[in-house]
Amino acid sequence: MSLKRFDDLVSELRHTLAGLSDKRKGSNTTYSMEAIGLSAFSVFFTQSPSFLAHQKTMEKNKGQSNCKRRSKSAACGGLKVRHLNL
């Protein structure tokens, strides 16, 4: 899939998710329906249970991960990864 097609797909998905009604009540509304939907999409798209798992698979299959290229850290971004996997 080309980057342009992927960007178009995510843009359309964002638009659709932003239009979903949110029936949650009380303090359970920290994340928007768009954020929840995009998180679910990422798991299905990458076929990994988390960002870190995807990076480890990429490291194994391709010899390097986006994480190591960007952060140059053996811990794969440390706090950033822990935050993304909450």
Image: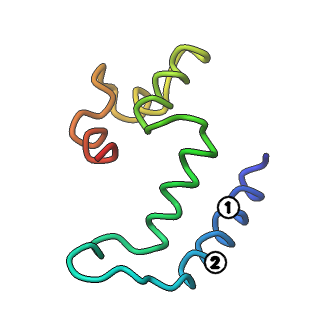
Q: How is the image coloured?
A: rainbow
- Where in the figure is residue 73, as x and y percent of width and height? 29, 25
Closer to us: mark 1 or mark 2?
2
What is the x, y in percent for residue 5? 77, 58
**Identity of the residue drawn at 55% across and 82% down:** 20
| Quadrant of the rendered image containing residue 8 | bottom right
Q: Position of residue 81 (x, y in %)?
A: 31, 39
Q: Residue at x 54, y 14 (%)?
A: 60
Q: Disc 1 or 2, which lies upstream in sequence? A: 1
Tag shown at residue 18? none
**Residue 22 locus on image (x, y percent):** 44, 82
Whether residue 21 sits left or right of residue 76 in the image: it is: right
Q: Nearer the viewer, residue 25 or 47?
A: 25
Q: CA distance from mark 1 to mark 2?
A: 14 Å
- Residue type at numbered disc 2: Thr
Contact between labelled residues 2 and 1, with CB atoms less than 8 Å apart: no
Q: Residue 80 vs residue 47: left or right?
A: left
**Label 1 environment density (alpha carbons within 10 Å; few <14, some 14–19, many ≥20):** few
**Residue at horizontal 55 percent and vertical 24 percent from the top:** 58
Q: In the image, what residue type sits under mark 1?
A: Asp
The residue pinned by badge 2 equals 16
Q: Residue at x 21, y 40 (%)?
A: 79
Q: Is residue 59 above or below residue 70?
A: above
Q: Secondary structure at mark 2?
A: helix
Judge left or right: residue 26 versus residue 19. Answer: left
Residue 58 against residue 40 in the figure, above or below: above
> Label 2: how many residues lie within 10 Å, few (<14), some (14-19) or many (20+)?
few
Q: How many marks?
A: 2
Give the residue at mark 1: 7
Q: Secondary structure at mark 1?
A: helix
